[in-house]
Image (cartoon, coloured by chain):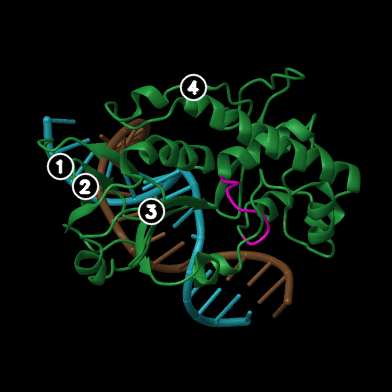
Chain colours: A green, B brown, C cyan
DNA sequence: AGTGCGGCCTGTCCGC
DNA sequence: TGCGGACAGGCCGCAC
């Protein structure tokens, strides 16, 4: 389940292998992703070099002079560099074949991911235009979170997972950041104090940055390995630990469903 | 406008 | 052992 750290790790992992490489072919085996993959991609991308790489939220951006390819990994997607003779696995939906014979290979069993092709500025793309700030960028802090949350009645967990508020905070890190900042996931967003907003924003930043660092520790294995970054190994304080002991107070962690998502928190430590 | 939920998918795990 | 069903979850699009 790629969260922002895994997307960032993917970007850093593939970047040196695709940047400034010319695309020789595009092999689209399964266009039925979250949205149909545009056929133009197959015809218009070959012959052009990847001149820029970027990320906006969980969207990966590959720029060429002919247009931009944008990829979202969804729930189960992954991108890796495949050797020229590397056998296909089930669910290898797309190969961007590079001029050194290797491929940027998109794999996605659940097909919640998507591949887009568009011209013009990324900021104008309908899926990107209304996104909130990057959590690790300069526009995201306690003040921002406080201002945006005024009069909002949604649970704070749903609020910070809304990509129009801030991008890249998925279910795992939302739970972790709320625990670390002592905020109850069901508290109405509009009832956050400025102090709590600051703690929460800081914890979101700290935890995401730390997870990216840990993903980075496996970068050297990324190309040859299975593409799984190492951040799963990090100790998660609450996620997946419903019913177990709180690491802070020893009490029992509670598991509920909030906005159709499993949510774990400590009733004693989070108010 | 804000809120809540359905739907898209397959692999994995559980109980019978 | 086989099978059905629940679950996992990002995020758009829709209904209210």
Quarter of the view holding residue A238: top right
Label 1 packing within 10 angstroms: few (<14), some (14-19), many (20+):
some
Q: Chain of mark 2?
A: A
Q: What whole-number distance in Å separates the C-alpha atoms at marks 2 and 4? A: 33 Å
Residue bearing the label numbered 2: A98
Could you give the CA–CA distance between mark 2 and mark 1, rounded to whole angstroms? 6 Å
Residue A99 is left or right of residue A220, and the answer is left
Q: Secondary structure at mark 3?
A: loop
Same chain, labels 3 and 1: yes
Q: What residue did someone put label 1 on?
A: A101
Mark 3 and 1 residues: CB-CB less than 8 Å, in contact? no
Q: Secondary structure at mark 2?
A: strand
The first of marks 3 and 2 along the sequence is 3
Residue A123 falls in image quadrant: bottom right
For the N terminus of chain A, the quadrant is top left
Tell me which residue sits at (72%, 33%) in the image: A179
Q: Position of residue A172 (x, y in %)?
A: 57, 38
Indicate which disc, 4 or 1, sits on the residue closer to the N terminus.
1
The part of the image, by quadrant, that contains residue B5 is bottom right
Q: Is residue A226 left or right of residue C11?
A: left
């Amino acid at each position: 389940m790629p969260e922002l750290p895994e997307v960032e790790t993917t970007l850093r992992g593939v970047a040196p292998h695709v940047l400034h490489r010319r695309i020789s072919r595009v092999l689209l085996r399964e266009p039925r992703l979250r949205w149909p993959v545009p056929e133009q991609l197959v015809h218009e991308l070959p012959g052009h070099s990847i001149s820029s790489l970027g990320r906006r939220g969980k969207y990966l951006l590959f720029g060429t002079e002919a247009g931009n390819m944008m990829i979202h990994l969804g729930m189960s997607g992954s991108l890796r560099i495949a050797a020229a003779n590397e056998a296909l696995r089930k669910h290898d939906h797309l190969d961007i074949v590079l001029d050194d014979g290797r491929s940027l290979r998109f794999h996605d069993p659940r097909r919640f991911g998507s591949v887009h092709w568009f011209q013009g500025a990324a900021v104008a793309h309908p899926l990107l235009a209304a996104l909130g700030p990057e959590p690790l960028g300069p526009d995201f802090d306690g003040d921002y979170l406080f201002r945006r949350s005024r009069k909002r009645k949604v649970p704070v967990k749903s609020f910070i997972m809304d990509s129009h508020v801030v991008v890249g905070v998925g279910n795992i890190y939302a739970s972790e950041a709320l625990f670390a900042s002592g905020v109850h996931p069901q508290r109405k967003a509009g009832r956050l104090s400025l102090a709590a907003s600051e703690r929460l924003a800081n914890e979101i930043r700290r935890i995401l940055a730390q997870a990216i660092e840990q993903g980075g520790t496996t970068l050297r294995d990324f190309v040859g390995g299975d593409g799984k970054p190492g951040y799963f190994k990090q100790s998660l304080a609450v996620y997946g630990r419903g019913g177990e002991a709180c690491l802070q107070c020893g009490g029992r962690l509670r598991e509920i469903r909030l906005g159709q998502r499993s949510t774990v928190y400590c009733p004693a430590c989070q108010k």
